[in-house]
Image: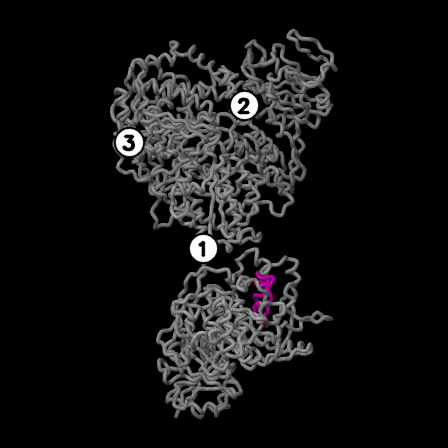
Amino acid sequence: MTRPALIPHKLPSHKSDSMLKDDTSQPPLKKRQRFMSTDESLFPSVRHAHGHRVPLTRPNFVPPPPTATAHDSVFINIAGCKPVILPCHGNMPLFHGNVVDVVVSPLFLDCFKLPQLMPPVLDSLGILGAPNLSVETMALISVQYLGQLGTRVPSREELDAAFLKARQETGPRDRAMQPQPPQFVTVAPAQLPWLAKTAAATSHGRVKVIVPQVSLAEGMNEAMRQISDTHPITKKPLYFVIIHVSRQRGTEFCVVVAGPIQARMLLESRFSIPECFKEISYQIITGKVHLLHTHFKRNSTENVDHDVLLDEFSNALKKNVFLPFNGKKEDKIAENLATSMTPHSVQNTTPEEFKLHPVQIAVAMKVLSQVCAIADSDQLALDLGRFSKVDLLIITAPSLVLHQQTIERVAQSGLLVDLGLEENSTVKAAEKYVMRCDKAPDTQTKFENFVSRVKAYPYTLFVLIQDQAHIDINRHSFGAQPLGLADRYINCQEVLKSANVLTLQVTPTPYVLQTKKSRLPPQNEIYMPTCVNQMTNVPPPEKVYFGLQDYIKTTEWTGRLPLLRYDPAFEQAADTLLEAYPRLYSLIIRTYLLIRQYTSALMSLSGIKGTKQETTTEAYNMLADMVNLPMKNSYGKGCMVLLRIPSIQLALLAHERLRSVRDKLGLQYRFDVLLSSMTTEFSLDDHFLSRLQSWHGRDKTWQPKTYEDLADLPCIMILSGQHTAGETWPKSLRYCDLRLVNCGVLDRTTVEQEIGLVCQYIDIENIHKAVTVCELSEEEDSDTDDTEGEEGEPEASIPTVPGNVPLPGPPALEPIAKSSLLDGDTSHRDTLSSHSQPDMSSKTQSTPMSTLEMHLKAPVDIPLRDPEPSHRIPAMSSVTDPSQVKVEDQTSESSEDKNTFADSPPPVLRIDWKLGTDEDGDEEEDTSGMDMKRLQGTPPVILVSKAAMCVLKPDAHHSADRLTYFNLPATRDTVWVSAVHPSLQPSMSNEMRSLFYRQWMEPKNYHYDYERKVENTTQPHHPRRLLLCGPHQVGKTGAFLHFARVLSRMLIRLQEVEVYDEEEINLEDIASLLLPPPPPPSPSAKWPDFELINQMSFDATVHLGRLSQVSPIHGTNMKPKSTTGAVERPTTSMMMSQYSAHNAFHHCDQCQHYKDIQLPEAQQARTHRFTFTSTMYGEDLEMQFVIPPQQEKHFVFNHSTGQLESMLLPVISEKMQVVSSPQQETNLAHNNNKGYLETMLRTVSTDKGPNAIKTPIFTPTSGRHEHGLINLFHAMGGAKHLHVLVVKQTEMMLYKKQWPNHILLVLPAVANDTGSGAAKFFIKELAYHNLELERNRQQELGVRRQDVWPFILLLDDSCVMWHCHDAGKQEDGKDTLVTLREVIEHVESTPKLSNFSMFGIRQWTSKNYTRSMQQNFSRNHLHNMVFINVDLTQNVQYDQNRYFGEEVDFNMRINSSKFVMCRFNQFSVMMKHINVGGQKEFPIHPKSGKTNQEISPQQFVCAPDSEDMTPLMATPQYLLEKYLSCMSAEKLFPLAVTNPHCPVLVVDYYIDLGPSVTVHYASSKPHSVNSEVSNLRFSGLLLYMVDSFVFAEFLKEFKFMSGAKLCLISPDRNTLRRQVVRLELEEQWRFRLRDEFQTANSPEDKPLFLLTGTHVE
């Protein structure tokens, strides 16, 4: 393998055209590489002693170092580093020499490019009106920034923040007072050199400014000379800032990084992770790691060689090993006995059940809510109404463990059974629905099967879930090593364009997906919280999430080591090695050092003397816990130590070394050493595998496949790979060593990803014991005051959890090594002193609250254990017993003391350490004395690198511009849009952070979103793509699995509809009213025979269940009831069919053109006004037709004026097949081989014009523009028809907006406050008026007047589905779904159609199949869906004033007029339960005063001109009807209560008087039919709005019992008195002045008047 060359970056510059021209003219480079050189023949030169030709006359030229060789850098040999050049501004000089001498990094290059930003963006940044920073100003700020860096590595984000802050400070404070910026904010070029040197003077020699006279090359040459100077006179600077100012080229400057650590970090940060791994492989293969082995062998104490010691110890053991478990830790036994040792079996081996937490359920419902929002949006991207099933495919990261873990989660959840995809929820069944994102053949097969199912099942909603979506974001490319496999799957055209595919991306770090070119709509992002608000009566949760923020908060603990920390001793040793071996890659050095410390700790724990001092306290303590804990129990259970090594080559070396050390020490039966990565499976030793099988109660064939299967196994798990995939770790994981990651360039995604490994839910019940807190003495108070910052740093606060539950602490208080204090390492003491003050400041409120802080209820209690031996820190007072801890009671203080508490010294934690010694200093500490329950009750300890710790927990005095965790670069795969950008604030919400990244980050060129164009597209985002993001291990898998379940339930629910299932009432003894059933095949089984129906008696009994509380009609079997009030109507859920009517929320491709039209066409909808004279109103009324352009074909317009003339009506064709005899119909039925039902529903040949049916459909609707079932496209089977919506003027715009392609008939203004009776009245009036117009028009065309179609259909807006019942079968016969078109066509095919006045069908019910249903036809009341012959019934009208009972009233009028109506009992209509609109009930409240005042029915009517009257906000007619139905029995007709033999006589109107009052209907119209009443005595008389047909002689025909009551109702008092005189009522009725009443309306509302009287003999 060849060594990869470090090719320097070739810098573009708008000022370097000449340089680039020289580069293009040079000859090809030879084997010895040179960079940015010119043709040497063009310049005079001399040959150096080493053979280099050095040009002399080129001013902008940097010669090579005099000692450079072809394959190595002279600077590494001399200065211990390779200089890194950071170009800033101006032309870079031309370099000559070896390519490996220096490195050019573009880190600061974009910082000095000033972008052009729009004023709104500038205003948001706070720099609107501020001038751009000059080059001199930016150079001076750069020098100041480098001087403040200290030993840290330069960062572009910090420099950008410094430039932005400087620009904000130079902006005008008050734009109105100071429109022009001040002039003194710029730096003159001549002043820059000495100002820069002045700024560098405070850097303690870390920054040196070089000001050359000729060119930038001169200064760079001087910097190189000083770097390569071998005379250690003074300490060399870390940074050289070269500034050259000239009139010709302006100000030019650059930075040369000469610090060994800083230059190394910048050099390594230029490589991608694959390039880093390649360099590591190269150095391992070439054997350069042996340098470290030689170093430690040469520099170790007494030249101790680990390998020699291990061999000696192994030989001393002979064939013995350490006892595996359950005994003394130093005991040894024979190896054959250790092999045969078996642990005690675990009693409870039942696996933990799959259980959803409240957070997961809440998030699943939130995702479902967003899916519904997508469906309801105007984009029409998702039509949930068309889907009846859910299918899914889960794409996981290419991790074998995560893949198996997800399969087990799916199998345990039972999701596949709930979705109806599988019969049994097994692991084998779940494998078909979980796919790894790799190049395996079975992966491609699974995805191809998924795509084929998507195409084959368009009515199934497929959910494509991509877990860990942040891992693979490369564009797809083919080859031996294909990239972008995730792009190939989730962004393929089959997924993007399929309307039945919903994509859900799941990730804990969504930043790589939130860019300017993101495919994800911002509104489709769902954030998963760590807890939900609990109700007051709900107990607190059993588990609390412990995440990244909680780990960071533990760094504020006092008196103990936090759960998140770094190892100062390790970092100091690593820095020393990094400076000593600059050629070795840093990760190799750190890995070798860490494994050596692990080895030393294991050797010390095994009893080898002199090895403990070569390890650190952190490594020793965690390995001591792992090694010694199995000895504390008889099961052999212990803890896990996770060691994260990103490089697989280094992980292999570490795995081999640790296993070798373990085996030589005889610990091979005490713990295992495992190696795992995404693409490799871990394997266990046979001894530990049998131990796991015994714990889990499995057979010998069982193998652990997930990390959770390794629970309680004592082991070191080495995890390698570039990424972690979100696998769940066992509760026995106690330590997570991340010191080998995040040691160089940091980004937020990597930091969260690595620390998120061990985030988990912790048990509250295992947390107990408290901390000792007491106050310092005055002397100690003064000492602690010195540690405070100048501005008062935020004081540490300790959060708690619900129910006074303490925050968990680490399992032990790890002792601080003596050597760390003696060597001058004060990090631990600084930690104790700087965080010893509890938080009393409000400044901490700016940081986001952790999960445990959200449960803040009580003071904190932290669990403690007593270490052996204890260490005592000097200068801290001791307590007698450290385990006896208590807090000073502050409750007894006076209020004055409490007010001054903030000024007094805060309480500080005191813990006494006892220092244990032994003569050799090698006595090990027993830190493993914790039981398994306590072990699993606290979060693991995390060790991170110092670089990561600096950004996670910066020091108290850091600058505001310093890089912190919140303003880290989001990810390596994105870049800043502009150098001028704000910093991410901790107080931002998740939504604000998303908008921040979307505005200021853009993907790199290999990102799969890089080539997307979003500027000029109408749909910049994919509408069916969602993002679910939440903290690591918070339960996202359970959330999206539950989402699929609730989505399926919702689709089933959408396919269901709540319909009324009311049993028909009053069915006793109606056989005499029905036609005897004819023997099949009877002609009456298909269409009614007019003569037979005419011979039938009209059944006036009301059978509709919703009218069970209306007044019984005399002469029927309706019985009065004593109960009053509303009755709950029973409903049932039914699956919607393909023939259902829909509301406005239904969207599909088939009916889109039926419901919606384009906006320009909707604006072209014309409104036509026409006026007709109404005899009922006695005036001309204006109605309006709103006709869309596509519906104008149904109307006739005047050719010259364009005025609407009429609505087209079809002609009754002579071709219509009419069965004239029973024999013909019998033959027809026998010749039809498709069965009885298809014979009955056959299509006849008629002349229907442009529509498939003849009858125009009118739907009166109010208050249901969204919920009304107005979409009849599917109900009509897609057939053309004429559908008119009848609406009020006040609701016209609502219906026009919701149904732009529907014809609207707008009622007159007088109908705005009326009920359903007025709408039906105007429909019938308009229909007859139009019929006459059409007859006149078509008569001119040669059509007979009687041939024009006379029927209309009144259809309720809650009719949802239609059924046909097969009467030829038994009572349990099955209903068949039919279309509305089939029902209408069947009714239109009725013989002698024009002789019938009305047709109707029954309301569906599942309660009973009575004889009325067995008879195909009956003559009774018609409801909900009524065909009306407007020609035959022209003189019979609906009551325009009615709110209730208008259908029964109209049916009674039709029957009394001798017209024949017929109900098709074989057809039924389902009525949907719609709880909004309908205008059935109106709120009644006072016209003035409190609107919530309760109004009783007695207040609906009052005495005229009464001062006690309370005017009500309701129409007089509505108040009257409500009063009559509620108070008739009590106030008006007491003798008629439950007295059906003496009913109340009602003339010309059927009005509901309550269920206890029986009424007798009589018509006063000429030629009307009334029942015989000679033997009937009435208990009351109701005269409602009597007309001229009612005479006194007519009323004298009826007999009334003594004391009968009269109620006369008129529109005003004058009419009331005239009617009394005209009808001669005073002859038989006695009236009193106090018997006159009016509805409770004000005079301007025109109240109705009532007059009551008593019958006298």
Residue span colored magenta: 1284-1307
Question: Would you place residue 818 above or below residue 892 in this image?
Answer: above
Q: Earlier in the sequence, mark 3 or mark 2?
A: 2
Q: Quadrant of the N terminus?
A: top right
Which residue reaches farthest top? 49
Front of the two marks 1 and 3: 1
Kind of residue at disc 2: Glu
- Residue 915's quadrant in the figure? top left
Q: Which residue is mark 3?
A: 931
Residue 1159 visible, this angle: yes
Q: Is residue 248 left or right of residue 433?
A: right
Q: Nearer the viewer, residue 913 or 429?
A: 429
- At horizontal 48% and vertical 86% (from top left) the residue drawn is 1569
| Residue 942 or residue 801, whichever sits in front | 942
Mark 1 — residue? 1052
Q: Amino acid at mark 3?
A: Asp
Q: Amino acid at mark 1?
A: Ile
**Which label belongs to residue 268?**
2
Helix, strand or loop at label 1? It is helix
